Image: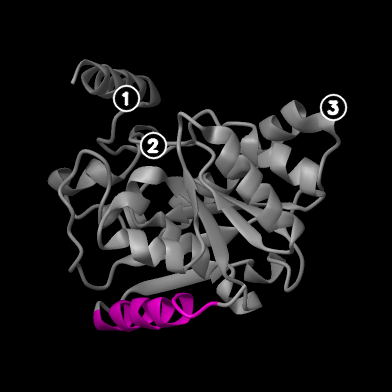
Amino acid sequence: MADFVYPPVIALAKTMFRALDMRLRVEGAERVPRTGGAVLVSNHISYLDFIFAGLAAHPSRRFVRFMAKKEVFDHKISGPLMRGMHHIPVDREAGAASYRQALAALKSGEVVGVFAEATISRSFTIKEIKSGAVRMASSANVPIIPIALWGTQRFWTKGRSKNLTQRHVPIDIYVGEPIAPPSRAEVEATTVELRSRMERLLDRAQREYPESPSGPADSWWLPAHLGGTAPTPEEAERLDAEERKRRQDS
């Protein structure tokens, strides 16, 4: 498919990265195939994650078609951009249509990006992941590529005000070894394996990150098990449940 919107958006993003003197580090980008379909599965800690997860495929000269909630496509500014970059809208009340669209993209040789946790992880650990990404890889017979992002939460995450003008922030992008497309009978076991690999990648990214919080007030972006003040996974689940209830009641 023709890409008239994606290249200038990437150029603009790189200009912003330079202006902010962002310290980007991408490891394992060569694991993204240069041709053919693939499912790229990233952790989710920021509203900006699709920008940085997409960078993992840039050295291979691939554009990633991300699956994103329908509301982003309905917005008057982001909507035309998302459609112009051929991302895939996900309507949670009609998920089969987005699944079919993603599957068609994979079978035509595209790279499809998925945030399998479905929502941002407030605890900055890997939540339970959905099996949809693995099922797509199985049906399209394409590899699954796990990715861990770290540092993106410092710009804009759930429950915190955005701070998009910070300078010198390190952003680490770790690309794991591809997982071969599983058979239909192996989908659930492969989903468990995918989550395990994502956990190991993220733990490494967190422990190798070149900065520590500047003080107690800054420790919000570090997970609780590493001494930060981010919610524990249990606290994060409670906050998510409260948010879901508020939406249902509104």
Q: Which mark is residue 240?
A: 1
Note whether residue 44 is visible.
no
The residue positioned 69% from the left and 48% from the top of the image is: 103
Across and down, in percent, residue 33 comes to: 73, 68
Q: Earlier in the sequence, mark 3 or mark 1?
A: 3
Category of crowding for the residue at label 2, using alpha-carbon neighbours closer than 10 angstroms: few (below 14), some (14–19), many (at least 20)? many
Residue for badge 3: 185
Find numbered disc 3 in the image and state the secondary structure of the residue it sits on: helix
Residue 74: percent from left, percent from top: 32, 50
Give the number of the mark in front: 2 or 1.
Answer: 1
Give the amino acid type for the residue marked by disc 1 in the picture. Answer: Asp
The local secondary structure at tag 2 comes to loop
Choose top left, top right, bottom left or bottom right for residue 211. Answer: bottom left
CA distance for labels 3 and 1: 31 Å
Locate the N terminus by quadrant.
Answer: bottom right
State the residue in front, 135 or 202: 135
Q: Position of residue 178 (x, y in %)?
A: 74, 54
Residue 235 falls within the magenta-colored stretch = no
Tell me what residue is drawn at x 74 percent, y 46 percent. Answer: 137
Residues 249 and 188: in front is 249
Q: Is residue 8 left or right of residue 131?
A: left
Query: In the image, is 187 to the left or to the right of 59?
Result: right
Q: Amino acid at mark 3?
A: Ala
Q: CA distance from mark 2 to mark 1?
A: 9 Å
Residue type at the position of mark 2: Ser
Q: Which mark is residue 144?
A: none
Residue at 32% in and 24% down:
240
Q: Pointer 2: what residue?
A: 121
Q: Indicate the quadrant where residue 225 lies.
A: top left
Q: Which residues are magenta?
A: 3-19
